[in-house]
Image (cartoon, rainbow, N blue to C red):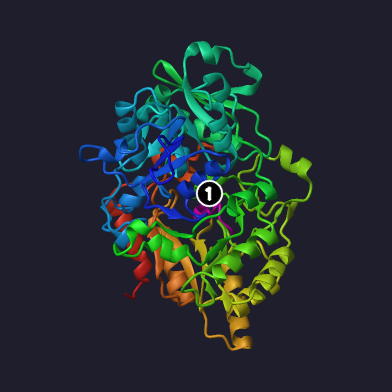
Amino acid sequence: MRARGWDQADVILFTGDAYIDHPAFGAAVIGRLLEAEGCRVAIVPQPNWRDDLRDFTKLGAPRLFFGVTAGAMDSMVNHYTANLRLRHDDAYTPGGKAGFRPDYAVTVYTRILKQLYPHVPVVAGGIEASLRRLTHYDYWSDSLKPSVLAESGADLLIYGMGEGVIQEVAKAMRNGYNAKLLRKIRQVAFMADENYVSRLDPAATIRLHSYDECLRDKRTFGENFATEETQSNLLEPEATLVEQVGDRYVVVTPPRATLTTEELDRSFDLPYERAPHPRYEGKGAIPAWEMIKHSVNIHRGCFGGCSFCTISAHQGKFIHSRSERSILAEVERIAQMPGFKGYLSDVGAPSANMYRMGGRDRELCRRCRRPSCLHPAKCPNLNNDHRPLLELYAKIRAVKGIKKAFIGSGIRYDLFDTAPYLETVLKHHTSGRLKVAPEHTEEAVLKLMRKPPFALFERLNADFRRICRDEGLPYQLVPYFISSHPGCTERDMRALAEKVLGKLHFTLEQVQDLTPTPMTLSSVMFYTGENPYTHEKVCVARSQEEKRRQKSYFFKVKGRR
């Protein structure tokens, strides 16, 4: 700040991640977007919350607001395994070292800032704030928690991807905290009193069950979730959600419309250094950065709607794709990076093969209430043409300096009906191991997961082996599976083991126990013991011993260890 002649920053961002100036990291994106609007932005990565709090005071107070994020992951997912054991590493810290962010980081950072600077607005954002914006089940305390707004004391919360919102927030605060302007912004949440809520248009407002009602009756919590998920998956949502917490109310304004290609390009085209901050030199590699530094994100959103996944709740169901120009320009920048040897680690997105896909008839999409375009069956209105993606792959392969562009993101094999996409991926974009996620084999469990029938994976396996045989490719298909999902019994796990390990002869490497994360259907079923849409009872493996027994089936077959 001294070098730039600043006596004060306009915005100071606090993040639980190390600072990496790259479009895959939220603090960098928000910082660059605000900078592009003329704001003076400072970023404090991984502040020490245990000492005299000098990291929170060394830059003074910002002119506009503090921004707070836990980082690219919910801090509790970052800290603990599915069996609640403390992790010994952190992929977003130099040297992979753990212990550089607190549990419930958004709440901890915000409370400190409000204690030190009670009159300076705090805006919370990122994945942790986004998925805890309303009453949610917290697996780590095994309890329902109220909105993070109520717990932290933040003045405003931006949910979802914040590119289209953060500039509006900064403009609304240009002359000080202006509640009237801020509360008109879409895709934000805030606390309000009864007087404010009573003036909302009843025709455009949905009153959820209160936090206290959810504590008393698990079914009301499930009903809240069904409403929230339905509203978040609308093409043009207009309803404001209101949920009472004590004598106050959480108000969530409707999300913004899907980002246009031009808006998304603008975010990715900003002048990122594409590197960790120099302060980390000599402190060890940052694993998350090493994994993505030579990768390209081609779109946002996912219409798969998997029950255990937070992507649609955070990024939305509808796909917004970057232009070929923007993607190819990023590939060219990567090709010029020091140390680049010609291999892109991933040309992908939340799901690798949804680029430029969506409904053929947008009017039908406007009326749609489905959480998934693929479950229980592929929507007949869905345009799943892979040709734009195949053309993009070909153009990336043609960029000077690119030897190979791998697909590291998960491929939805229920999206392609014919072999050309799979053949192209195997011949040009596979490093030797193709990872896919059938997640389970049994129909009842797959239905609750919102995943396709296992027969589609068996067909993929046959096509994979045929193409590899015909092309002389010594590749391996690597399936992911989940144990202890609501609705899954030990009998289901035994059947999975017999089919996958016995009949198909896979050696499983990618296996995991379900972690119920906030704002997912799976976490709601885990907590309530029923499907919130049908009220059908669902068996749940709750104890660590039950979960351990289910996971053990990944490593044995009946009669054979």
Left or right, 20 with respect to 326, comes to left
Q: Name the residue under label 1.
A: 311
Q: What residue type is labelled 1?
A: Ile
Work out whether 507 lies above or below 39: below
x, y (%) of residue 254?
60, 31
Q: Say which residue appears at 58% left-offset and 52% top-offset.
A: 270
The magenta stretch is: 444-453
Which quadrant is the C terminus positioned in? bottom left
Q: Say which residue appears at 63% left-offset and 81% top-offset.
A: 467
Instruction: Please tell me whether mark 1 sits on a helix, a strand or a loop.
Output: helix
x, y (%) of residue 245?
41, 22
x, y (%) of residue 223?
51, 31
Q: Say which residue appears at 43% left-offset and 48% top-offset.
A: 486
Work out whether 156 lies above or below 265: above
In magenta segment, residue 447: yes
> Do we see residue 414 in this rendering?
no
| The quadrant where residue 495 appears | bottom left
